[in-house]
Image (cartoon, grey):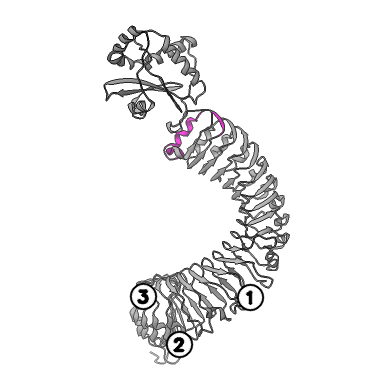
């Protein structure tokens, strides 16, 4: 054996040149599992321990605290639990600690404040709690402090006055509260500042050093900041991300003319603007941001018009949110130049005039929301060019005409919502039979006419259908029986007639008809059948003619049977109660009736329970009832006067019962007339 032959290191191990001791352990992204061996603490010459991007679990071994030469500790992206070992402070040479994306618990150790050489401390995406240690103010060489997505509480203590080298501060998605330390605003070396999703309060001084040319990322979204946006924001010429949404900022948006590198800008959900004409003048400043991809100014108090310079915004703009403001006037035709737009939300304003046909040039558009404005005219046929469109909202406008046939080319459309307009005409089967993509279809409160297309049966993914308050006629399409995913179905206020299709019976097991409250078919005067909960009259089914008895004779026999069946229960009443009255009647020469109220009939029939139902006809049902604690049995016929012809039938039956004499029939004991109910 050659004694002087050098030892070849294993893959992932780095050895020193002089002493052949292990100085580096690099085992990242090898799908390693189990726990980190405590024997790693015996590698006394180790400078780099890199185990990131594996599946190590259990606790971080405290033996790592014996590695006094350790400079880089990289354990991020594992499944490590337990607390951060406080004796890491013994690793006095540490330059970098990255424990992010694990399941660590407990507090941030105060002892970490003794690591005077530490440059990077990353503990984001864990389950750490407690406050930010005040001892971290001693880390004068610290450049990156990242503690986002934990459960940190309390206020951010003023630890930043001595941390002059900080380039990144990340405390997003915690439960931090209180005022923000003013010393943060003077850190002119900051590149990234992230405090979103906390409960931090306060206002901004007008001149902030933090808004320097080095700042690239600034996000304070979803906090409780108030006051105005500082004018010094224009100094941040390298800013690419500016997130201020979800606060209570007010006033005018300052000049943004120097923010040429801005890619994402959101002011959503504040109180910005005054409702004045020039509130959106800053939009023209943003035309210089040639890489702008996201612009959100919705849910504010911006007034005036959407300026024509909107057409000159970045050709890379993909998301433009303007909803819920006080904007007026016409939509700029130049919006059609923003050909990369994927989402355009202009709803809940006061826009008027016609929808610009140029919107049809936005062929990358997925979502278009123009609802709740005062737009008029017709839906542009150019919308048929929006082949990627999945959601189209045109609710609550003054749109006229029909839905253009060209919309049938939007094969990916999942939501079509056009309620409360003045749309009219016959709905084309091409629109309804578009594809199986429809999930939500709302055509309600318009003036559509004609039959509703049978092609609705192709919408096998449909969950919501509202065609109420129109003038649809004919039969309800049997194709609805194929829409087994429907959860809400509204068809009331139309002119549908005939029966509810038998095909809808297939929906009772798992569709909308398992719950009648999710379905409305009222206001269709000629509709019959369906669930009892629909309160529709029973249908008259025409049987095929087979010869034999004539139709007239059948009708007479049917009437006779109905009368006999309806009065059979009176026999008992006659023998038990009425005979005494007959005797009195003959002596007085006048007829007396049993004194009954609607409430007593309701009680006698258990609320007209189906268990007391004797029989049902075209215009009503006969129920058995008990009076005087069961001593008297009566029969009650309830007529449904909503059904055409019921009133005439009511009069005819009363006349018949008045004049007919038969040993199996008794006199009419009582007539009760009640709103929405008549009975004999």
Q: Nearer the viewer, residue 339 or 203?
A: 203
Report the mark closest to the observer, 1 or 2. 1
Above or below, 586 relative to 475 = above
Q: Position of residue 394 (x, y in %)?
A: 62, 47
Q: How dense is the environment of label 1, judged by Cα within 10 Å: few (below 14), some, or many (20 and up)?
A: some
Q: What is the C-alpha distance between the residues marked 1 and 2?
A: 34 Å
Q: In terms of image quadrants, where is residue 562?
A: top left
Q: Which residue is mark 3?
A: 83
Q: Indicate whether residue 3 is drawn in magenta.
A: no
As rendered, which of 355 and 623 lies closer to the eye? Answer: 623
| Picture coordinates of residue 416, whole percent (x, y) | 59, 46
Circle 2 is placed at which residue position?
116
Q: Whole-Å distance between the Cαs marked 2 and 3?
A: 22 Å
- For the C terminus, give its image quadrant: top left
Residue 500 point in image, percent of width and height = 49, 30
Does the magenta-highlighted stretch encompass residue 511?
yes
Residue that mark 1 sits on: 232
Of mark 3 and mark 1, the one earlier in the sequence is: 3
**Contact between labelled residues 2 and 1, with CB atoms less than 8 Å apart:** no
Viewer-side residue, 270 vs 149: 270
Q: Earlier in the sequence, mark 2 or mark 3?
A: 3
Query: Of tags 3 and 1, which is closer to the observer?
Result: 1
SS for callout 1: helix
| In the image: residue 354, left or right of residue 432 | right
Is residue 159 shown above or below 678?
Answer: below
Q: Can I make out residue 33 in this image?
A: no
Provide the secondary structure element on which disc 3 rests: loop
Please name the residue shown 37% across and 21% down the image.
Answer: 636
Q: Is residue 147 left or right of residue 390?
A: left
Say which quadrant the N terminus sits in.
Answer: bottom left
List x then y, in percent, for residue 313: 69, 63
- Residue at the (44%, 87%) spot, across then down: 93
């Amino acid at each position: 054996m050659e004694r002087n032959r050098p030892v070849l290191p294993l893959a992932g191990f780095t050895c020193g040149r002089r002493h052949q001791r292990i100085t580096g352990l690099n085992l990242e992204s090898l799908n390693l599992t189990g726990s980190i061996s405590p024997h790693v603490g015996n590698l006394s010459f180790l400078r780099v321990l890199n185990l990131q991007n594996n599946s190590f679990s259990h606790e971080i071994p405290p033996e790592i605290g014996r590695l006094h030469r350790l400079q880089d500790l990289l354990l991020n992206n594992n499944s490590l639990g337990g607390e951060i070992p406080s004796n890491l402070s013994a690793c006095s040479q540490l330059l970098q600690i990255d424990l992010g994306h694990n399941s660590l618990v407990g507090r941030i150790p105060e002892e970490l404040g003794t690591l005077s050489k530490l440059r990077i401390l990353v503990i984001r995406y864990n389950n750490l709690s407690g406050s930010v240690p005040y001892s971290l103010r001693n880390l004068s060489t610290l450049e990156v402090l990242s503690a986002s997505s934990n459960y940190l509480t309390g206020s951010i203590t003023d630890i930043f006055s001595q941390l002059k080298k900080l380039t990144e501060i990340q405390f997003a998605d915690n439960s931090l509260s209180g005022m923000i330390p003013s010393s943060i605003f003077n850190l002119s070396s900051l590149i990234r500042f992230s405090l979103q999703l906390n409960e931090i309060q306060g206002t901004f001084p007008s001149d902030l050093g933090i808004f320097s040319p080095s700042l690239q990322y600034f996000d304070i979204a979803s906090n409780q900041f108030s006051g105005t946006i500082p004018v010094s924001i224009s100094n941040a010429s390298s800013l690419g991300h500016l997130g201020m949404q979800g606060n209570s900022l007010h006033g005018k948006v300052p000049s943004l003319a120097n923010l040429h590198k801005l890619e994402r800008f959101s002011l959503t959900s504040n109180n910005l603007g005054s409702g004045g004409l020039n509130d959106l003048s800053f939009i023209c400043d943003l035309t210089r941001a040639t890489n702008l991809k996201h612009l959100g100014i919705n849910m504010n108090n911006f007034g005036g018009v959407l300026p024509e310079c909107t057409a000159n915004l970045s050709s890379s703009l993909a998301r433009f949110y303007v909803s819920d403001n006080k904007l007026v006037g016409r939509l700029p035709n130049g919006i059609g130049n923003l050909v990369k737009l994927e989402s355009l939300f202009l709803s809940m304003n006061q826009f008027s005039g016609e929808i610009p046909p140029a919107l049809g040039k936005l062929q990358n558009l997925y979502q278009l929301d123009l609802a709740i404005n005062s737009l008029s005219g017709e839906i542009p046929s150019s919308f048929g060019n929006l082949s990627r469109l999945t959601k189209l909202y045109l609710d609550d406008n003054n749109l006229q005409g029909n839905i253009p046939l060209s919309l049938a080319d939007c094969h990916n459309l999942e939501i079509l919502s056009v309620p409360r307009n003045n749309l009219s005409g016959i709905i084309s089967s091409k629109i309804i039979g578009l594809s199986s993509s429809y999930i939500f279809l709302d055509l309600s409160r318009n003036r559509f006419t004609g039959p509703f297309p049978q092609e609705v049966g192709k919408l096998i993914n449909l969950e919501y259908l509202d065609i109420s308050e129109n003038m649809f006629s004919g039969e309800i399409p049997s194709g609805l029986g194929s829409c087994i995913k429907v959860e809400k179905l509204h068809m009331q206020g139309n002119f549908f007639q005939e029966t509810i299709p038998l095909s809808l019976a297939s929906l009772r097991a798992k569709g909308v008809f398992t719950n009648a409250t999710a379905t409305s078919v009222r206001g269709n005067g000629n509709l019959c059948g369906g669930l009892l909960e629909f309160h529709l009259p029973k249908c008259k089914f025409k049987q095929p003619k087979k010869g034999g008895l004539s139709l007239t004779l059948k009708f007479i026999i049917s009437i006779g049977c109905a009368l006999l069946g309806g009065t059979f229960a009176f026999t008992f009443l006659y023998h038990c109660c009425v005979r005494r009255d007959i005797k009195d009647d003959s002596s007085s020469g006048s007829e007396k009736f049993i004194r009954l109220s609607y409430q007593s009939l309701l009680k006698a029939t258990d609320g007209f329970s189906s268990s007391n139902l004797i029989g049902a006809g075209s215009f009503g049902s006969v129920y058995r009832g008990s009076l005087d604690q069961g001593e008297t049995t009566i029969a009650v016929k309830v007529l449904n006067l909503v059904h055409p012809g019921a009133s005439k039938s009511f009069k005819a039956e009363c006349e018949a019962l008045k004049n007919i004499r038969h040993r199996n029939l008794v006199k009419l004991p009582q007539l009760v007339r009640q709103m929405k109910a008549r009975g004999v």
